[in-house]
Amino acid sequence: MSSTEERRFQVLRAIVADYVSTKEPIGSKTLVDRHNLGVSSATVRNDMAVLEAEGYITQTHTSSGRVPTDKGYRQFVDRISEVKPLSAAERRAILQFLESGVDLDDVLRRGVRLLAQLTRQVAWCSTRPCRRRPYDTSKWSP
């Protein structure tokens, strides 16, 4: 990944973090003031324009800052391990914690509790029953 692409991801990561905590559109000056990006607000504005053109962020109205799109959140989540990779010990502890689950409900309950503890954020999980009926393959026979 080029340094420009990496910087753009850092800008996206900062926008996601700030938007999640403030629920307000984020401008380039705010990003430069709050995060150590090492570039000017003009460079951040250019990066934001590229991120917007690629569909990772959007502007709610002409004079506002930017907010992440679903695609932007997905990119952030897909690369979260690059932000803070897990150590071998953390991986082992998580696997042991989850493997001691009795059934799916217990594993989900444990997973949500662990996620909340690790992130110090609210975490929840919901499962929906499968409403799709299995295919009747007898109709496919010649």
Image (cartoon, grey):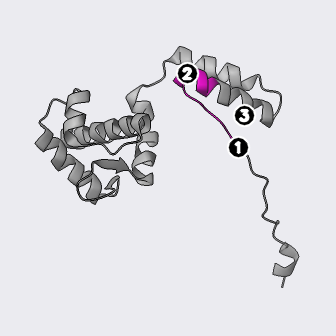
Q: Earlier in the sequence, mark 3 or mark 2?
A: 3
10 Å crowding of disc 2: few (<14), some (14-19), many (20+): few
What span is in magenta? 114-125
What amino acid type should be assigned to the residue bearing mark 2? Leu
Camera-near label (3 vs 1) is 1
Screen quadrant of the C terminus: bottom right
Q: Secondary structure at mark 2?
A: helix
Within 10 Å of the Cα at label 3, are there few (<14), some (14-19), or many (20+) other Cα atoms? some
Image-quadrant location for residue 116: top right
Image check: 115 left or right of 76? Answer: right
Residue indicated by mark 1: 126
Three-letter code, disc 1: Ser
Q: Is residue 20 left or right of residue 92?
A: left
Q: Residue at point 55% right, 21% down?
A: 118
Q: Which residue is mark 2?
A: 118
In the rendering, at what x and y percent does residue 64 appear?
27, 51
Q: Which residue is mark 3?
A: 108
N-terminal label among 3 and 1: 3
Q: Is residue 37 above or below residue 54?
A: above
Residues tagged 2 and 1 counted as in contact (Cβ below 8 A)? no
Q: Nearer the viewer, residue 14 or 54?
A: 14
CA neighbours of label 1 inside 10 A, class few (<14), some (14 to 19), many (20+): few
- Whether residue 75 is situated above or below residue 106 in the rendered picture: below
Image location (x, y in percent) of residue 78: 45, 42
Q: Position of residue 56 (x, y in %)?
A: 35, 52
Q: Could you tell me if residue 29 is visible in this image?
A: yes
- The location of residue 33, given as percent across then percent down, is 21, 29
98 sits left or right of 6 in the view: right
Q: Is residue 117 magenta?
A: yes
Which amino acid lies under the numbered mark 3 shown in the image of this protein? Leu
- Give residue 81's quadrant in the image: top left
